[in-house]
Image (cartoon, rainbow, N blue to C red):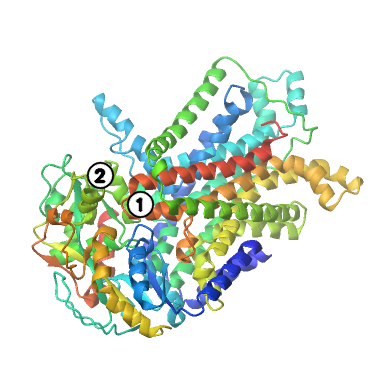
Amino acid sequence: MAIAGLMAAALAVVFLRAGSPRLGAADWAAVRFSASQAAASALASVLLAVPVARALARRRFAGRGLLIAAMGAPFLLPVVVAVLGLLAIFGRAGLVNAGLAALGLPQIGIYGFHGVVLAHVFLNMPLAVRMILHGWQGVPAERVRLAQSLGLGPWGVFRHIEWPMLRGVVPGALLAVFLICLTSFAVVLILGGGPRATTVELAIWQAVRFDFDLSRAAMLASVQFLLCGAAVLLAARWTAPGVLGGGLDRALSLPAPGGWRRVADVVAIGAAGVFLAWPVAMIGVWGLGGLTSLPQAVWAGAATSIALSLVVALLTGLAVVALASAAARAGVLARLAEAAGMLPMAASSLVLGIGLFLMLHPVMAPSRLALPVTALVNTLMALPFALRLVLPAWREAEATQGRLADSLGLTGLGRLRLAILPRVRRPLGMAVGLAAALAMGDLGVITLFASDQGGTLPLQVWRLMGAYRTDQAEAAALLLTVLSFAVFILFDLWGRCGTEA
Amino acid sequence: MKALFLATCGLMAATTLTMADTPVLTVLTYDSFASDWGPGPVVEKAFEADCGCDLRFVPAGDGAALLSRLRLEGARSEADVVLGLDTNLTAAAKATGLFAPHGVSAALDLPIAWDDATFLPFDWGWFAFVYDKARVTAPPTSIEALADSDLKVVIQDPRSSTPGLGLLMWVKAAYGERSGEIWEKLADNILTVTPGWSESYDLFLKGEADMVLSYTTSPAYHLIAEQDDSKAAAAFDEGHYLQVEVAGVLANAKQPDLARKFMAFVVSEPFQAAIPETNWMYPAKTPAAGLPEGFGTLIQPARSLLFPADEAQAVRDAAVEEWRAALAK
């Protein structure tokens, strides 16, 4: 309730400051472009993620755990750094074109719609893999046994176990990637090649900064809100309820068929690994040289960012447990709780920030509140993902263990600890880890609330870039990536320990 | 959250206690001015040496972000002085009615005449396309020649970046009626458009583009800080558009006397001497010791282009629409 209130108030305040809104043709072009690139990116990410997740679910090999963990890395990269990493491979002066030139072949261009989709797949496919992999890992061992004793072949396993599971998991993954891509703007502008690649978020940015037309900004934010709402509803309609039933939580992976399927799995894992690792490796290579000469301010920024990300992790953990426990029940209130959790996704972080700014400004100087507001906004922005990740597992746990818990009279903390937590621990760990890591890398709201309290690490990276100090900026970006990854791994490992990943 | 909030409040209380007897002058400025690598720290130290005050920089994004911040805050702004608007923003800034006359009369070294009672220039620079001498051996000599070449450039979005908007003004000032046609010819030379200057410049340094929209002074950074003379700015025959960065006093300043003192300090030696090698721009008043050595190697445009503030404001929206239409094809 508090969340919904805060969001509505933020939007309302921006509206109040504004007059009557008006959207032009360019704004509608931005809406269309945002939606189409986000839909294409979501489809491509999830289609590519399914074979990779399946291969990871049914194969066991050395370094598998590490690979799954490392899948988080692209998602956590500072956006501009990720784009530079991709350009080092696919850009005009990149390795692929250098190779093509050496072979006398024509050059490929990355700038355009396909470049935007490529970058979004790079950034979000790993997230989709993780979400879908959770689905595979959630298949009860009893089902696998049953399939084995019935002598089901790979096709039968797909039809009776994997397809129903995917029907439950894929819409959520599509939704998450769609929503992330919908509000992206730096990637889209740089790789889209110019103003034809204008997203709603960029149009909002323009309305605020360039035209100072708050009513248009609020109007655009509302359109974005409606788009997100439509996507959430669609995903909810497509999501099939869990039909696989419960089990005794014993780990048993699916049968690993041989023959060409084995080769296909190796190719899927190998290709994904190379595609994701290559640009990340470039960032490592650039940054290593400057790590020793990082200025003091960068280390101070790192300390601020670590504290910020831990606060956000704590807040997100508490909020998601509260929301999920409400949303997992049946009834109208549950729907409301779920919707409240998805709301922040719809709001543009810029408009949310301005709303908070206008609300706080009469009370005290916003520059004194930069860090608390950043923590709050980041928690709000992380909630939708967290809820998406945790809610399916929570519902599953309530469906399979709820009646037993009821008959034992388990309520409150005891129910949470014994019946629910063991089954949602893995997605919860990942969700909190993501929230912490995203907060670490966030450079949205803090610039609006600009303060002299000392910058966060992403702010310092941006400042170094702005001061021509590219080498140090790259080293600081590497540090940021490593730290984001470290907090993510920390919570993710907590989620995975005790459960077979 | 609560802990953080309390900590913030505690910190504020502590600040208030220690600063109780020293007045605080609050200067709203763009981020890279106040950062550890900008002029901020040097300026702060020099001004605090004899003002008997605490100079506090509040950094807010870039020049355009300063103005939107100011409009959000209105007359209740905590700032006394705003530092870092440019001539594309001053008309709108003046129209807010939030500024008071600066009251400083100083002879400045700008390439154009300056007469503005509200805004006082603190530095300036010419926009230019910067290239790597090893890769581009015959740089173009005008925007039109660039459009006719097959060189690839990165520019910035005028809607989110002040240099990006500067290029629009440059084309408009140099080509007038023909500006739309020039943009259509330029479209195939534009590799991509980035939201801000730093992304563009990084793409250029990575070898992704042949040229980047920056300043004539950019090569001086590489020369002085990195002993690297491989970068140069292309000199264009039609002249180069100017960016003049200005400071202004807010009418509702809580420390009006200190604010006026600071404005006089802005065009004084200690402030101006810090500009070339921290902000990498030309100081508004050349320091007694002259410019740093590396600046002598930079190109000196024969013509300087600049729209008066009102005209810049008037042509802005049409210029952006023209740019968008030409590039969206």
Count of marks placed on residues: 2
Tell me what residue is drawn at x 27 percent, y 61 percent: B163
Q: Where is residue A153 in the image (x, y as percent from the top left)?
A: 66, 19
Vertical relation: A72 (above or below) A315: above
Give the image quarter of residue B251.
bottom left
Task: Please state which of residues A317 and A44 is positioned toward the viewer in this rendering.
Answer: A317
Tell me what residue is drawn at x 62 percent, y 18 percent: A257
Say whether residue B96 is visible: no
Q: Same chain for marks 1 and 2?
A: no
Marks 1,2: beta carbons within 8 A: no
Tell me what residue is drawn at x 23 percent, y 25 percent: A104
Quadrant of the image for the N terminus of chain A? bottom right
Say whether residue A10 is visible: yes
Which residue ends up furthest to the top in the rendered image?
Answer: A259
Left or right of A137 in this view: B209: left
Task: Please state which of residues A102 and B105 is positioned toward the viewer in this rendering.
Answer: B105
Q: Position of residue B246 (x, y in %)?
A: 28, 72
Q: Residue A465 carries which label?
A: 1
Q: Residues within 10 Å of mark 1 (few under 14, many from 20)?
A: many
Task: Please state which of residues B149 and A238 is positioned toward the viewer in this rendering.
Answer: B149
Q: Position of residue A15 (x, y in %)?
A: 51, 74
**Location of mark 2 (residue):** B209
As helix, strand or loop, the secondary structure at mark 2 comes to: loop
- Kind of residue at badge 2: Ala
